[in-house]
Image (cartoon, helix red, strand yellow):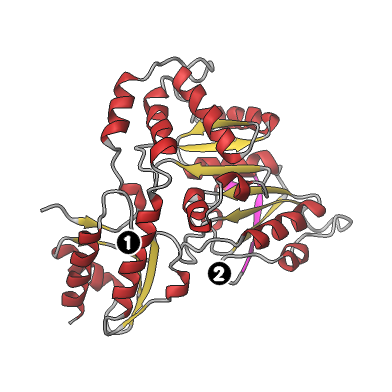
């Protein structure tokens, strides 16, 4: 019997339609710009984000790094949430590769207010301080439970940044989860940003890749950075073909993942010794705290029963629903959790 894998939505496998499209995709050399399948994906992706242009990158981490490089220069500063992926999980790439310092800002639920934006912009007339060049927002926000920014709050924060001359990069790794949760098009969310990155390889279930979108000149510079970072690939249409299927067929089904996450969270909240803030279960991420058992021991015991999860603190666990997980898996997982905790 296959394990129920809640470690991440990156463990998704491509659908049969994706696999077939990958086999039959027309190919060319993307570094030369003549891969027809990749070019088509870029057109579709840019349109979905409401941007001029797009380029394929191997990962969301590279996409975010390029977003920092395009929007800030060496010796400048980027504002980011203190729990953001760019600050927390990207191995100081902004500093190591781009020479850009990140200024972390603690927020409520990952949502940065216009006041916080304003307060963290450095005075340009002080030679002791770096110039604040850009800001990044994350939507949905991973470490804050997969919460979705209310559109009004996102627009207000973006406006506050632009009013102070900052460029805005949106880490939209799961932007389509946010769009489905809000019932809007992804372009409405991306409208706050100058550049945006989204992942194909999470909830959209593609095997590899992310997309970087922005103005034509930003994407041209992004392609140069992609080459510099070793991310220029050749017949990448074999991967882009899966992305086209994903954007056509995998976005609306994200609602199933959200429903499964809600059922899972509600079931976990009923178990003794489990605390789960249901207000933060808005998409496909479920975070919960254990009161009677260390998180590593809990996930180890769950693994023995065929349930894989991710502990991210001494008492904190993350479960992620995704393509390949169905309602029966949720019930089976809850039974395993109950047994392990008993």
Label 1 crowding class (10 Å Cα cut-off): few <14, some 14-19, many 20+?
many
Image-based side of 221 in relation to 226, left or right: right
Residue 30 visible within the image: yes
Do the CB atoms of the residues marked 2 and 1 lie less than 8 Å apart?
no
Identify the secondary structure beneath mark 2: loop
Q: Quadrant of the C terminus?
A: bottom left
**Where is residue 8 drawn, in percent x and y?**
34, 54
Q: Nearer the viewer, mark 2 or mark 1?
A: 1
Q: Is residue 223 magenta?
A: no
**Where, by quadrant of the figure, is residue 298 drawn?**
bottom left
Find residue 104 and report its horizontal and vertical position in percent.
63, 63
Q: Which residue is mark 1?
A: 260
The one nearer the camera, 37 or 97, is 37
**Can residue 314 be seen?**
no
Q: Residue at x 29, y 81 (%)?
A: 270
When the figure is inspected, residue 131 is found, relative to residue 286, above or below; the finding is above
């Amino acid at each position: 019997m296959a394990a129920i894998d809640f470690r991440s939505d990156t463990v998704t496998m491509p659908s049969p339609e994706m696999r077939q499209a990958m086999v039959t995709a027309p190919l060319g050399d993307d570094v030369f710009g003549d891969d027809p399948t990749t070019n088509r994906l870029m057109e579709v992706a840019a349109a979905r984000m409401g941007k001029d242009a797009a380029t394929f990158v191997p990962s969301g981490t590279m996409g975010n790094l390029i977003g920092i490089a395009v929007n800030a220069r060496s010796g400048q500063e980027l504002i980011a949430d203190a729990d953001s992926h760019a600050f927390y999980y990207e191995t100081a790439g902004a500093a190591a590769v781009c020479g850009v310092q990140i200024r972390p800002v603690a927020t409520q639920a990952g949502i940065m207010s216009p006041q916080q934006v304003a307060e963290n912009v450095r005075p340009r007339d002080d030679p002791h301080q770096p110039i604040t060049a850009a800001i990044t927002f994350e939507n949905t926000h991973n470490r804050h439970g997969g919460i979705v920014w209310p559109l009004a709050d996102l627009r207000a924060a973006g406006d506050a940044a632009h009013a102070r001359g900052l460029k805005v990069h949106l880490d939209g790794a799961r932007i389509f989860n946010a769009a489905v949760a809000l019932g809007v098009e992804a372009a409405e969310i991306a409208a706050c940003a100058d550049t945006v990155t989204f992942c194909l390889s999470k909830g959209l279930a593609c095997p590899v890749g992310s997309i970087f979108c922005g103005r034509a000149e930003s994407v041209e510079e992004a392609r140069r950075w992609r080459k510099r970072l070793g991310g220029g690939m050749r017949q990448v249409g074999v991967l882009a073909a899966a992305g086209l299927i994903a954007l056509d067929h995998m976005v609306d089904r994200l609602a199933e993942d959200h429903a499964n996450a809600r059922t899972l969270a509600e079931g976990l909240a009923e178990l003794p010794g489990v605390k789960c803030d249901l207000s933060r279960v808005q998409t496909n991420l479920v975070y919960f705290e254990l009161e009677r058992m260390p998180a590593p021991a809990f996930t180890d015991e769950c693994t023995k029963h065929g349930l894989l999860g991710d502990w991210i603190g001494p008492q904190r666990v993350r479960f992620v629903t995704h393509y390949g997980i169905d309602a029966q898996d949720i019930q089976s997982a809850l039974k395993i959790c109950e047994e392990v905790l008993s």
